[in-house]
């Protein structure tokens, strides 16, 4: 069965996109067929995977004009890794979809006919709780929460958790949390304290692998490179490699 993971955290800059892209590359390189769906108008994961934002149709046409998702899937340079591109037009989605019937389920409906072609679908989301994020919640089988090990990491989490609880109660979805990725570890006392608080709060859901802050991660992202080729021996690449193994272990039990 395909796993559809939404990477969710309403706080900005907590590595939703970076974790989506590096998990996607890692899973594809382990031979899994992977689809990334970019629901963010900033389209950072689209840019990181393709190096341009010129492709059409995008997720916008799928959600707004009824384009079939199958017609919007494009291959990337990485074997087994495919993308539904984002678009700046998605910034108008809240307005355009406000009165659409079944607006919360549009992504789930569009994905249904194609999802079984993949082993993993990873949905990158915007840093807010608008209609696109709600669509990502409804379309996924599980949630992955990236958390930056910085001062206010847990304050935003209560908003995310109460939103998830509301959706569970009102929209009849389960929304299990598959895992929590602790990221941007600075090896400071502050990072250690925040990590302890995150582990206290989420328990075993927190992956053992903690991703360090490492300039190679940012460079790979900015240079449209795959981290595992760009800087294979970097602390960032090694940590993401371990995380991919943990994800496979947790998802597939092997
Ligand atoms: N391990 C890392 N080490 C150093 N920099 C990182 C690391 N992970 C991510 N970054 C950088 O941190 C910034 C925020 O990461 P990213 O864009 O993935 O977060 P985001 O949650 O998707 O942000 P947004 O909410 O704006 O979509 C980016 O500049 C990214 O390159
Ligand atoms: Mg992002």
Image (spheres, rainbow, N blue to C red):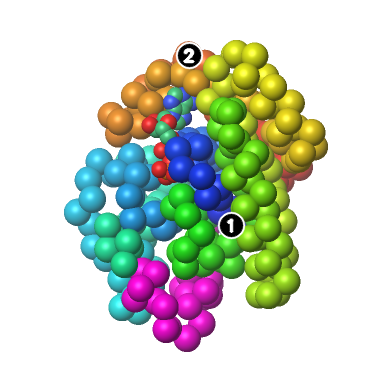
Q: Camera-side residue: 160 or 41? A: 160
**Identity of the residue drawn at 51% across and 45% down:** 11
User: In the rendered structure, does residue 12 fall within the stretch colored magenta?
Assistant: no
Start-end of magenta stretch = 93-119
As drawn, 103 above or below 149: below
Q: Residues within 10 Å of mark 1 (few under 14, many from 20)?
A: many
Kind of element beneath mark 1? strand
Marks 2 and 1, the one that precedes in the sequence: 1
Question: Percent position (x, y) of residue 186?
Answer: 55, 17
Question: Percent position (x, y) of residue 114?
Answer: 48, 68
As drawn, 98 above or below 237: below
**Which circle marks residue 108 in the picture?**
none
**Identity of the residue drawn at 70% across and 51% down:** 177
As drawn, 162 above or below 213: below
**Identity of the residue drawn at 71% across and 62% down:** 165
**Identity of the residue drawn at 35% across and 73% down:** 95
Residue extending furthest bottom?
101
Judge left or right: residue 83 versus residue 212. Answer: left
Image quadrant holding the C terminus, namely top right
- Identify the residue under disc 1: 4
User: In the rendered structure, does residue 96 fall within the stretch colored magenta?
Assistant: yes
Judge left or right: residue 30 versus residue 48. Answer: right
Quarter of the image for residue 96 reads bottom left
Q: Camera-side residue: 14 or 139? A: 14
Magenta-highlighted stretch: main secondary structure? helix
- Identify the residue under disc 2: 233
């Amino acid at each position: 069965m395909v796993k559809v993971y939404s990477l969710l955290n309403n706080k900005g800059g907590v590595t939703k996109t970076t974790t989506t892209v590096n998990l996607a590359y890692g899973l594809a390189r382990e031979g899994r067929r992977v689809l990334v769906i970019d629901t963010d108008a900033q389209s950072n994961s689209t840019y990181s995977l393709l190096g341009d934002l010129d492709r059409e149709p995008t997720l916008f046409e799928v959600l707004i004009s009824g384009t079939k998702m199958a017609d919007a899937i494009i291959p990337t340079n990485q074997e087994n890794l495919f993308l539904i591109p984002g678009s700046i037009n998605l910034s108008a989605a809240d307005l355009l979809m406000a009165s659409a019937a079944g607006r919360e389920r549009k992504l789930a409906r569009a994905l249904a006919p194609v999802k079984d072609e993949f082993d993993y679908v990873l949905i990158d989301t915007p840093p807010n709780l608008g209609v696109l994020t709600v669509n990502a919640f409804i379309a996924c089988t599980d949630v992955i929460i990236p958390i930056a090990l910085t001062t206010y990491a847990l304050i935003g989490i209560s908003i995310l958790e109460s939103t998830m609880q509301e959706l569970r109660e009102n929209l009849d979805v389960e929304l299990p949390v598959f895992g929590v990725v602790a990221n941007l570890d600075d090896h400071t006392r502050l990072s250690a304290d925040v990590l302890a608080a995150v582990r206290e709060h989420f328990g075993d859901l927190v992956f053992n692998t903690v991703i360090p802050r490492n300039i190679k991660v940012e460079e790979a992202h900015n240079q449209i490179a795959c981290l595992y080729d760009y800087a294979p021996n970097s602390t960032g690449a090694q940590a993401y490699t371990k995380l991919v193994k943990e994800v496979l272990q947790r998802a597939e039990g092997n």
